[in-house]
Amino acid sequence: MSPPELCFSLHTATPRDMLRIQMISASRYVAEDEEAQPPLLFPPYRSTVLRAPKRPPVRIPQTLTEITGPASAWESLGGPACSDLTKQHAGAPLGQRIVMAGRVLDEAGRPVPRTLIEVWQANAAGRYAHAKDQWDAPLDPNFTGAGRLVTDDEGRYRLTTIRPGAYPWGNHDNAWRPAHIHLSLFGAAFASRLVTQCYFEGDPLIALDPIAASVPEGARERLIARFDLGLTEPSFALGYVFDIVLRGPASTPTEDPA
Ligand SMILES: [Fe+2]
């Protein structure tokens, strides 16, 4: 599913903004733990059969292009963060209000500050505010389901939203996606780009989902947000913790590299 229109775009940056991008140098990145990543071809996830490359991938050498990226520039490029998806319209959206928070870490377990995190998700009924989503579930006029955040100096982020609903997706008979939030992260370098999705602890649909199953079992747990009473706000929202690791042996798996 493509994301709905996000509330910022690099295309909105002016030439002056682009000149303000600070390119930082980073050390070279260790190789991915391929055992923790979903395969390019996973037949139970049907669309991988069509789009998985037929030839072995070519590994790109880590040159300056791969180990650098924009830093400290996301706000100037994209404007204010949109970290509360429940306050983007006149009224409150329907559904279970949640807070999801955590840290973004690098391959050595160090916090990654000023990481851009973009999120998109379905509403509480399981429907995206997107023209291509036409299944018979109601749209919510008070919920768009897209936002962007930038991690603080300790690599922390905090998102307020509503818990997304499950939705059917036609991959197989009676196929339903577990509740999930899509995330796109852009760390300190282009090599630390990550697109993934997180699930919610205790959802019985996770075990039935071919996309989640495409992630090797030992790494699948890294995609599950955990309920946290300490993060839960009294009379306001349930709290979930979801930490994200960019690259390295403990990296958060991608959703589908094909
Ligand atoms: Fe989705």
Image (cartoon, helix red, strand yellow):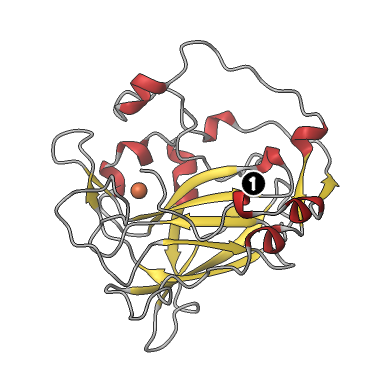
Q: Position of residue 76 (x, y in %)?
A: 71, 62
**What is the crowding at mark 1: few (fewer than 14 residues within 10 Å), some, or many (at least 20)?**
many
Q: How many marks?
A: 1
Q: Position of residue 258 (x, y in %)?
A: 46, 27
Task: Indicate the quadrant where residue 75 lies.
Answer: bottom right
**Residue lying at 60% horizontally and 49% vertically, measured from the top left:** 11
Q: Is residue 103 above or below residue 2?
A: below
Q: Relative to 25, is 147 on the left or the right?
A: left
**Residue lying at 40% horizontally and 73% vertically, measured from the top left:** 98
User: Visible in this render: residue 29?
Assistant: no
Q: Relative to 7, is 20 on the left or the right?
A: right
**Residue lying at 63% horizontally and 60% vertically, measured from the top left:** 78
Outermost residue to the top: 55
Task: Indicate the quadrant where residue 30 lies.
Answer: top right
Task: Indicate the quadrant where residue 69 lies.
Answer: top right
**Residue lying at 43% horizontally and 20% vertically, measured from the top left:** 52
Residue 191 vs residue 240, the one in the foreground: 191
Outermost residue to the front: 15
Q: Is the CB atom of the residue marked by disc 1 within 8 angstroms of ligand 1's nearest atom? A: no
Q: Relative to 19, is 165 on the left or the right?
A: left
User: Visible in this render: residue 54?
Assistant: yes
Residue 52 vs residue 21, the one in the foreground: 21
Q: Secondary structure at mark 1?
A: loop
Residue type at mark 1 is Leu
Residue occupied by mark 1: 246
Q: Position of residue 209 (x, y in %)?
A: 29, 41
Residue 78 vs residue 187, the one in the foreground: 78
Q: Position of residue 248 (x, y in %)?
A: 67, 40
Position of the N terminus, as image quadrant, is: top left
